[in-house]
Image (tube, helix red, strand yellow):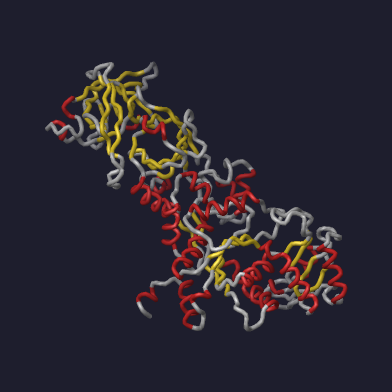
C-alpha cells in the first residue's frame, strides 16, 4: 500500500476502492441528514466535517437534508438553527432537501409494496407488537394481521392517510422475516398515524414515515453515493438495503451505507434527548448556553469554527467508540485564538494600588501591542493614572523567593508601563488588605529607550487604571459535569453529576478600549484567558464569557 493510501482513513479507503471498482467520480454525492428535533452538538460537528470534508476532497456535492418525519418533536426553530450552524462552520451545501419533500413518493412506494405483498397494516397495540418481536435468541411471532388481503390493507392504509383512524389504532409494517437474527428485520413499522401539524406540510398528512423507511429511500431519490452514519446504525444497514431493493431495479444506482464510531466528549453529554432535559429543567440557560456541547453554545462561548473543524479532523473517524477529553478541543481553541485574538488588560478580582509619587491629576496614554502573533494587528493606547487595579493574587504582604509578583519591598513591571515598588499596605478593620501603596520609577517607562526602561525585574503584571476602567459582567465557565462520562452509569441519572460550580459570575474591571467591543468578538485577557463578548451584551451592560483558560488547569484540579 502506498504512503498516500496508508494516510487515508477507512471511510476514504472505502470511497477509493469503490472508484477503483466501477464508481465514477462524478457519481460521488454525500449528505448531512439531521433530524430537526433539537440543536446540533459537537458530535454532529464531526459528522458535518466528515461529509462536507469529503465533498471538498472529491469535488462532490453534499446535500443538507432534514429527515423531518416526526412532527411531534420537530420545529422550524431547529431547522433554522441547524442551517446557521453548518454555515457558521464554513460549509455550503449543494441542495437543501427534506424527507417531507418525498412524502407522496414514499406513500406511493408503500402502496406498491402492499400490492406486492411486502407490507401490511397491523392493528395491534405497540405493546403487543413489541412483545411479539421476540428476543435476539428467540424468533418473533407473526402478527395475526400479517395475512390480511391486499384489498383490506389498501383500504385501511388509505383510511390512515385520510385521518379516519385514531392515533395508535393501526400501523403499516414491512413483511420481511419474523425469525431473522436481526431483530430490525422482524416486520419493522413503516408508517404510524399522527394527527399533528408538520412544520412544512401543515395538516396535509395524517400518517408519517418511520426513520428507517424514509432515510434510505431519501438517499436513493437524491442519488447519494455514500450514506455515512454512526455505529449504532450498523444493524440498520440490512434493512436500509432491503427497503431500497423494493423500490429500485438492479440497474439503478444504489446508495451504500457505511458506519463510523461516535466520538464522545468528556464532561458533557452528546444526546439531543439529554441536552433537551438540561434545557427543560432549566439547569442551563438554553440550547446555546456556553456550557452546552451544542455548536450554538460553543459559538456563544467563543469557540471558533476553525478550532472545531481542526478538532474534528484531529480525532478522525474510527470503528470503535471512545471518549475524547475536553482539553483536546480546548487546545485547538487556544491555538486558533492565539493567532487572532487581541491582547487586552482586565482585572477580575481587583486590589487597588496607589502610586504615591505619581501626580494626582496626571494621566497618560501608553502604547500597547494588540497581538504579537499577528503582524497586522497594530497597537492601541491604554490610560495610566495614580490609582490602578491589579489582581488580588498578584500581591502578598510576605512571600518566599519563588513568588515573582508584587510583595512588600519588592518590584514588578506593569505591562506596557512602569516598574513599581510596594512600600506599605492599608487594611480594613478585619485585617484585610484593601490598598497597596507603591512608588514608581519614572525612568522605567516601557519602550522609552532609556536604560531604566530596559531594567529587568522578574515579574510583569497586568493592570487597569481605576479612573478609566469600565465594569463588565464576566461569566467564568467550567465543566458542566464533575465526571468524565456522566451518562456511562446506566444505574444513575446523569443529572446527579452536574457541576455546581460550572458558572461563576464576577464583576470585571476592563481597559476602556473594550467599551466598543461587539457581540462574539474575541479577546485575550492577558494572563487570565480567552474571552468573548456575549451575544446579549449591550453598551451599558457589557457581558463577557470566558472561552478557555490560557492553560489546561482541569488536570490539576482533578488530582
Question: Along the line of sight, which residue is nearer the eye, 280 or 312?
Answer: 312
Tell whether 207 sits left or right of 411. Answer: right
Question: Along the line of sight, which residue is nearer the eye, 332 or 430?
Answer: 332
Vertical comparison of 97 with 300: above or below: below
> Where, quadrant-wise, is the N terminus in this rendering?
bottom left
Residue positioned 72% across, 57% down in the render: 201
Vertical comparison of 180 with 356: above or below: below
Vertical comparison of 296 with 537: above or below: below
Q: Position of residue 70 (x, y in %)?
A: 70, 58
Residue positioned 71% across, 71% down in the render: 135
Residue positioned 41% across, 40% down in the render: 531
Q: Where is residue 258 in the image (x, y as percent from the top left)?
A: 55, 72
Q: Position of residue 183 (x, y in %)?
A: 69, 72
Splitting the image into 4 quarters, where does residue 184 fall?
bottom right
Splitting the image into 4 quarters, where does residue 178 fall?
bottom right
- Residue 470 in view here: yes
Amino acid at each position: 500500500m502506498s504512503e498516500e493510501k496508508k494516510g487515508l482513513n477507512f471511510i476514504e479507503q472505502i470511497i477509493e476502492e469503490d472508484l477503483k471498482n466501477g464508481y465514477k467520480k462524478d457519481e460521488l454525492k454525500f449528505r448531512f441528514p439531521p433530524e430537526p428535533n433539537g440543536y446540533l452538538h459537537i458530535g454532529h460537528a464531526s459528522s458535518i466535517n466528515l461529509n462536507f470534508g469529503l465533498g471538498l476532497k472529491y469535488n462532490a456535492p453534499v446535500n443538507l437534508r432534514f429527515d423531518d418525519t416526526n412532527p411531534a418533536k420537530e420545529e422550524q426553530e431547529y431547522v433554522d438553527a441547524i442551517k446557521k450552524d453548518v454555515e457558521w462552520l464554513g460549509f455550503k451545501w449543494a441542495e437543501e432537501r427534506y424527507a417531507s419533500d418525498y412524502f407522496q413518493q414514499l406513500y406511493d412506494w408503500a402502496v406498491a409494496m402492499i400490492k406486492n405483498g411486502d407490507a401490511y397494516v397491523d392493528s395491534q397495540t405497540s405493546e403487543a407488537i413489541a412483545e411479539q418481536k421476540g428476543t435476539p435468541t428467540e424468533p418473533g411471532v407473526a402478527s395475526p394481521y400479517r395475512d390480511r388481503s391486499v384489498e383490506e390493507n389498501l383500504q385501511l392504509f388509505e383510511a390512515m392517510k385520510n385521518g379516519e383512524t385514531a392515533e395508535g389504532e393501526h400501523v403499516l409494517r414491512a413483511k420481511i422475516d419474523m425469525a431473522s437474527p436481526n431483530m430490525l428485520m422482524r416486520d419493522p413499522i413503516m408508517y404510524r398515524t399522527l394527527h399533528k401539524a408538520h412544520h412544512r406540510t401543515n395538516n396535509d398528512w395524517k400518517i408519517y414515515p418511520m426513520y428507517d423507511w424514509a432515510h434510505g429511500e431519501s438517499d436513493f431519490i437524491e442519488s447519494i453515493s455514500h450514506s455515512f452514519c454512526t455505529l449504532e446504525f450498523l444493524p440498520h444497514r440490512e434493512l436500509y438495503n432491503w427497503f431500497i431493493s423494493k423500490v429500485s431495479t438492479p440497474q439503478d444506482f444504489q446508495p451504500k451505507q457505511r458506519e463510523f464510531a461516535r466520538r464522545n466528549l468528556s464532561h458533557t453529554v452528546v444526546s439531543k434527548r439529554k441536552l433537551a432535559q438540561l434545557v427543560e429543567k432549566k439547569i442551563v440557560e438554553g440550547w446555546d448556553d456556553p456550557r452546552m456541547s451544542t455548536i450554538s453554545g460553543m459559538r456563544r462561548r467563543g469557540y471558533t469554527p476553525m478550532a472545531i473543524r481542526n478538532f474534528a479532523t484531529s480525532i478522525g473517524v474510527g470503528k470503535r467508540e471512545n471518549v475524547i477529553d475536553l482539553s483536546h478541543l480546548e487546545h485547538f481553541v487556544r491555538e486558533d485564538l492565539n493567532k487572532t485574538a487581541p491582547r487586552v488588560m482586565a482585572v477580575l478580582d481587583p486590589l487597588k494600588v496607589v502610586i504615591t509619587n505619581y501626580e494626582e491629576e496626571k494621566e497618560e496614554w501608553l502604547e500597547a501591542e494588540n497581538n504579537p502573533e499577528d503582524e497586522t494587528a497594530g497597537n492601541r493606547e491604554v490610560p495610566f493614572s495614580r490609582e490602578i487595579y491589579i489582581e488580588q493574587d498578584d500581591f502578598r504582604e510576605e512571600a518566599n523567593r519563588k513568588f515573582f509578583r508584587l510583595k512588600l519591598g519588592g518590584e514588578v513591571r506593569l505591562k506596557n508601563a512602569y516598574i513599581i515598588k510596594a512600600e506599605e499596605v492599608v487594611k480594613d478593620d478585619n485585617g484585610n488588605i484593601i490598598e497597596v501603596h507603591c512608588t514608581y520609577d519614572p525612568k522605567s517607562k516601557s519602550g522609552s529607550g532609556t536604560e531604566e526602561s530596559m531594567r529587568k525585574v522578574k515579574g510583569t503584571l497586568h493592570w487597569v487604571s481605576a479612573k478609566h476602567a469600565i465594569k463588565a459582567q464576566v461569566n467564568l465557565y467550567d465543566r458542566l459535569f464533575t465526571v468524565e462520562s456522566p451518562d456511562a452509569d446506566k444505574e444513575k441519572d446523569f443529572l446527579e453529576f452536574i457541576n455546581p460550580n460550572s458558572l461563576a459570575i464576577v464583576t470585571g474591571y476592563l481597559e476602556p478600549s473594550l467599551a466598543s467591543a461587539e457581540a462574539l468578538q474575541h479577546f485575550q485577557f492577558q494572563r487570565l484567558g480567552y474571552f468573548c463578548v456575549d451575544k446579549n451584551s449591550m453598551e451599558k451592560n457589557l457581558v463577557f464569557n470566558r472561552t478557555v483558560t490560557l492553560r489546561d488547569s482541569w488536570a490539576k484540579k482533578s488530582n
